[in-house]
Amino acid sequence: MKVMATGTFDILHPGHVLFLKKAKELGGEDAVLAVVIARDSTVEKRKRTPIIPQEQRLEMIKSLKPVDEAYLGHAGDMFKIVEEIKPDIIAIGSDQDHNVDKLQESLDKRGINAKAMRVEDYMFGELDSTCKIIKRIKHTDFKDKTGELY
Ligand SMILES: Cc1cc2nc3c(=O)[nH]c(=O)nc-3n(C[C@H](O)[C@H](O)[C@H](O)COP(=O)(O)O)c2cc1C
Ligand SMILES: Nc1ncnc2c1ncn2[C@@H]1O[C@H](COP(=O)(O)OP(=O)(O)OP(=O)(O)O)[C@@H](O)[C@H]1O
């Protein structure tokens, strides 16, 4: 079965890898995992300014073990890429801001034969989100080996 997972994936961390592994598991033994990377313009609108540009975020996701295919999403219509990829399952992360029931309704209305499913697993840790990594960087005084701030 083909599973589609989506996200920004700005500054990768182990929680992203857990999500992708668990998303692929939803598709059973012969699962194929296709990942849609949110465009910079989408991230700006929906979340915040991304740090890593979309092409670099795509390159990193493509290189991860569970990932079979990865694509940049389109600007605007979020269902166009779904129609192109034709997934059996759309995996939504546990803290992802998409309502699974509403998403399923929209898929059904559009005649897309995919099941929206939530991945319940979440990896908790000191730096378990991109936001926390950004905050850590902002509040760190970086010094070189002589102790000089740079
Ligand atoms: C079914 C589905 C299709 C999507 N298609 C696109 C798309 O074509 N282009 C895009 O920029 N974002 C797309 N997104 C949105 C992003 O992947 C992402 O969910 C959104 O920017 C919020 O960021 P986050 O999921 O990292 O929190 C899609 C999301 C879903 C659930
Ligand atoms: N710690 C985590 N454990 C499990 N899944 C995670 C974790 N962090 C993110 N994910 C999942 O990875 C996908 C991409 O997440 P996203 O790029 O929004 O990362 P993020 O770290 O949550 O970013 P931000 O802090 O900017 O919101 C989403 O489906 C999200 O639910």
Image: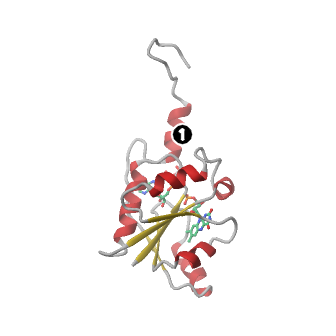
User: What residue is drawn where x is 49% and y is 40%?
Assistant: 133
Residue 41: x and y in percent read 68, 56
Q: Is residue 78 left or right of residue 7?
A: right
Residue 79: x and y in percent read 62, 75
Q: Is mark 1 within 8 Å of ligand 2?
A: yes
User: What residue is drawn where x is 41% and y is 60%?
Assistant: 19
Label 1 SS = helix
Q: Quadrant of residue 46?
A: bottom right
Between residue 91 and residue 31, name the one nearer to us. 31
Q: Is residue 17 left or right of residue 114?
A: left
Q: Quadrant of the C terminus?
A: top right
Between residue 84 and residue 17, name the one nearer to us. 84
User: What residue is drawn where x is 65% and y is 47%?
Assistant: 49
Q: Is residue 18 above or below residue 102?
A: above
Q: Amino acid at mark 1?
A: Ile
Q: Quadrant of residue 26?
A: bottom left
Q: Is residue 125 above or below residue 99?
A: above
Identify the residue under disc 1.
Answer: 134
Q: Is residue 50 above or below residue 76?
A: above
Q: Quadrant of residue 28?
A: bottom left
Residue 100: x and y in percent read 51, 74
Please count the marks in the image.
1
Between residue 139 and residue 16, name the one nearer to us. 16
User: What residue is drawn where x is 43% and y is 54%?
Assistant: 63
Q: Is residue 45 left or right of residue 150?
A: right
Q: Residues within 10 Å of mark 1 (few under 14, many from 20)?
A: some
